[in-house]
Amino acid sequence: MLAPPDVASPEGADAPPPPQRTTLERLRVPPLTDRLTGWLVTLAVTAIAFALRVVHLGRPNALIFDETYYAKDAYSLLRFGYERSWPDDANTKIIAGNPDVLNNAASFIVHPQVGKWLIAAGEHVFGMTSVGWRVGPLIVGTLLVLVLTRLVRRVSRSTLIGGLAGLLLAFDGLAYVMSRVALLDIFLAFFLVTAVACLAADRDWFRNRLAAHLERHDLTDLGGRFGPALVVRPWRIAAGLSFGLALGSKWNALYVLAAFALLGLAWDVGARRLAGAGTAAYTGILRDGLPAFVSLVLLSAVVYVSTWISWLSTTGGYDRNWGTQHPEAWTTRFLGAPLASLIQYHRDIWGFHTGDYINHATHSYDAKPIGWLLIVRPLSMHYQGDLPAGAGSCSGADTCVSSVLAIGTPALWWGGVIALVAAVILWVGVRDWRFGIPVVGVLSVWLPWFSYDTRPVFYFYAVALIPFTVMAVALCLGRLIGDARAGDRRMLGGVLAGAFVALVAANFAWLHPILSGEPITYARWRARMWFRSWI
């Protein structure tokens, strides 16, 4: 099913070698012929993800873990356009149905506003309730499954493999939990995967335009010439917009932007070389790189600044009047007081993220990134151990507990480690470009966190890793299943791939009670704590 990228799949050891394809044929990326089936599969998988996530969305009826910050910040944005502080007893009053207890003072917040505005949209429709502040993550977390399905379908050239990727992500415990809590990381993951999907579409668009140029001028190749400039590229502009929104969710999107900008440039150089540009292809580092910088980096910066429009258009936010109070500052003189205030605010946020307070802080659920892929230290977002007997599935005199544990589905994550190793080999050793996407995605999300090992970091940050890990797994399953002409080998590969998906689904079902806050007996909860570090 997942054929090598630029060569036909062999029918067998004794089959004649496939005919050499022309440059035009190797460049052109034709659309998949099963467009209707592709969308039906995509929507079916997305519907499964939504159905899993929406049930008992408002459970537990509480502000759990960092919802105490982001759900309240979102409500403040909805009311005033900037974040205000709250009294100490605000959570109790909010759950009691009285959210309008904000203080007049601005609150110092340390993350940008896009994710909080998306949370606020749900609060606008459903009110300041546990359902209201979780609807935004629910919708975006579900759309993440849709976008990943389309990305993997495009790259693998297979609706089956794309559908498997979406299904695996739907059954991941961490993606499930983060789609049901009002934190920012699900928004980061969605916009990052959307941006990468746009870059993958841009790769196809660019190669097809090169092929069209050759065909239009009746050329077999570029003959050592650079070829058409193709400065305005719609999919790359869409990627820049998405990266800007990712940055507006959390700053660490910058690492992913930088990594994929370089990978996209490498794709451009490779496409021009394939088209026959020869050494002229390497001038694309500047000639294609400068337009790419504008479309990706500068555009994402403009989008990022625009996400602060509500803060800029009001006067009550933290540091909002700094520029007016410091007219002598060079930022005020050159940029004006509002933007100077925004820059100062970012300095203060950066100071928080790198300062002594955060670097000397401790947390019982601190999870070093070295252990993320192996799920060494998941995070308990909610645990209540004093539920009355008979609640939920409890019965008799059993002690009942309710838990929301942010944990990935182990079968998927542990299998993903093997798939990522295979992806590195297939990308670097076999030169299959498709595996570069999950490898670069995982490394650009994961590795930067190793420089923050002096401060508490949490396992749930890894939710931005799992779509790329799932992509590696799905592409490896495609290699396992093989081409449509692979005969019995394809049947065996299909059985093994199906067994793996079934194992992931069963593992997710086993963990589901401790992911969803379902009241269960203490014995059932304890049976799911496979390691001491999970407690």
Image (tube, rainbow, N blue to C red):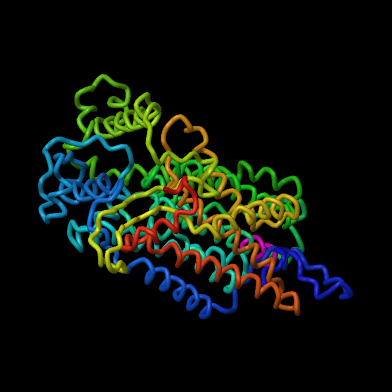
Residue 527 seen from this side: yes
The residue closer to the viewer here, 522 or 69, is 522
Q: Residue at x 45, y 67 (%)?
A: 509
Q: Residue at x 50, y 62 (%)?
A: 148
Q: Within the magenta stretch, is there residue 214?
A: yes
Side of 216 where 63 appears, left or right:
left
- In the displayed structure, 199 sits above or below 302; it is below
Quadrant assignment, res 9: bottom right
Side of 318 where 246 appears, left or right:
right
Q: Position of residue 268 (x, y in %)?
A: 63, 52
Quadrant assignment, res 158: bottom right
Q: Position of residue 265 (x, y in %)?
A: 61, 47
Q: Which residues are magenta?
A: 209-216
Q: How many marks?
A: 0
- In the displayed structure, 302 sits above or below 403; it is above
- In the displayed structure, 238 sits above or below 371; it is below
Q: Residue furthest front?
A: 397
The residue closer to the viewer here, 68 or 423, is 68
Q: Quadrant of the N terminus?
A: bottom right
Residue 198 seen from this side: no
Per the picture, the main secondary structure of the magenta-coloured stretch is: helix
Quadrant assignment, res 18: bottom right
The residue closer to the viewer here, 83 or 492, is 492
Side of 235 where 381 appears, left or right:
left
Q: Within the magenta stretch, is there residue 418?
A: no
Q: Position of residue 231 (x, y in %)?
A: 54, 52
Q: Position of residue 343 (x, y in %)?
A: 32, 31
